[in-house]
Image (cartoon, grey):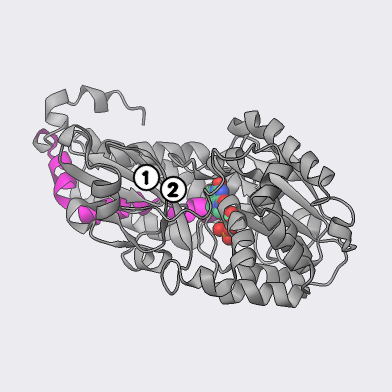
Amino acid sequence: MEETIVLLRNKGKIDPKSAADYVKTGGYEALRKALSMNGAEIIEELKQAGLRGRGGAGFPTYRKLQFAYDAPGDVKYIVCNADEGEPGTNKDRILLSTDPCAILEGMAIAGKAVNAHVGFIYLRAEYTYLMPILEAAIASSIEEGCLGENIFGSGFDFTVKLRSGAGAYVCGEETALFESIEGKRGEPRFRPPFPGIKGLFGKPTVLNNVETLANIAPIFRNGAEWYRSLGTENSPGTKLFTVCGNVKHRGVYEFQMGINLKELIYEVCGGIEDDRKLLAVQTGGASGAIINAEQIDMTLDIDSVSASGGRLGCGTILVIDDRNCIIDIVRNNLDFFRDESCGKCTPCREGGTRLYQLISKIAKGQGSVRDLDTIQDLAETMRLTALCGLGHSTAVPVTSSIQNFYFEYLSHIDRDHCPVCSQTGGEYYDSFED
Ligand SMILES: Cc1cc2nc3c(=O)[nH]c(=O)nc-3n(C[C@H](O)[C@H](O)[C@H](O)COP(=O)(O)O)c2cc1C
Ligand code: SF4
């Protein structure tokens, strides 16, 4: 099965630190084209292309630009979310390390659209080693006249600054990220006002994921119609999928939106490691839904995955084989979320810990069917009342796994019946802290 390579076109072929190399491949031509257009025309092109965010929610990119374009004010910002904190995900890292100029070009086009002159890249703390590559790509782009003052003699100025992340998952949430850049503790803000009106330093801000921004230059170079010819009607373009867990060939793959999940696992990734049986798949990262082996014949695009109760999110696919216990996987997820909760709002701070305690109790064979009802109530409360996406989605792995692995939950309520745990004798679970 052939990948469709758009975003990874320069991977391994150019020196990522050299804008001159990037230019030789047609780089910065899209920016040149966009500089001859006005803001409304640029936004219209992105609307026609149908580009949607690759960082989680799949929000239409043109609408974010439109909010900032409409907002009054002389100072506006473009922010690239390179926090990539979702467990198992490393697709943004590939783009940042192999083709950073494509991201800078996308940022500059977005800047021209809304009349912003400064952009920030907020780089995951664990990716600090990429700083020199990004610094060199920015300096070299300025040297080539593709960034900085009076780009291509157009009179438009645009510079990009780098900021290191704070090492917390929640700092990937857009408003927590703004707080962090502003030098404060990275906690989400109340909304409204939304970032397009009042974002970084209180100014209208467009924030996009790395991969979203990397899509902008190809759209302007090849046209919206070309972009629409890739992917599905509501999710055009290609998508980077990070496939991790128990497959034979793990990695980051680029396919058109709409690829079938079963084909991705069995044809592209070579099937399950050691030819084991597939137990479950979690799509969209740690806060994604967990589905069972019978459900994997599904289309991977933003709306299809949502319709099946999950989310495509950043495109991470965790494959789980039958050597794993599903309750243990969920417990691990909850351990992560309770740890990463910033504690600002009660539903997430208390709810996350309570969910973890309940799942640990079930895992230890001390749970009851009533605990499953309590989990559902807590999940709904968190979904409706938490302040940010972290709290909204903490319970998704639990609720989806209860739905799709009910038998396994009942087996744990009477622990001896779980095929995985009965082999470990349960000592592992007994070691969990409450
Ligand atoms: C807890 C939390 C962590 C997030 N982490 C990231 C991240 O690491 N990278 C990212 O692009 N988006 C992340 N997001 C989503 C961002 O808030 C935002 O929606 C996204 O960057 C928007 O970009 P897009 O429209 O290009 O998808 C996170 C959201 C939440 C709630
Ligand atoms: S939902 Fe969780 S991470 Fe988000 S603000 Fe509330 S406590 Fe913080």
Task: State whether residue 257 appears in this view.
Answer: yes
Confirm whether the magenta stretch covers residue 322.
no
Residue 70 vs 105, above or below: the answer is: below
Q: Is residue 203 above or below residue 123?
A: below
Q: Check residue 408 for magenta coloring.
A: yes
Q: Position of residue 194 (x, y in %)?
A: 68, 65
Does the beta carbon of the residue at mark 2 sit less than 8 Å from ligand 2?
no
Label 1 C-beta lies within 8 Å of the nearest ligand 2 atom? no
Instruction: State how far apart marks 1 and 2 are (Cα).
Output: 6 Å
Residue furthest toward the front? 24
Specify the label residue 351 is tagged with.
Answer: 2
Give whichever of 413, 272 is nearer the camera: 272
Give the residue type at disc 1.
Leu
Along the line of sight, the residue nearer the viewer: 407 or 163: 163
Which residue lies under the disc numbered 1?
Answer: 355
Badge 1 vs badge 2, beta-carbon distance below 8 Å: yes
Image coordinates of residue 185 in percent, x first then y, are: 69, 40
Amino acid type assigned to the residue bearing label 2 in the image: Gly
Q: Is residue 224 left or right of residue 274?
A: right
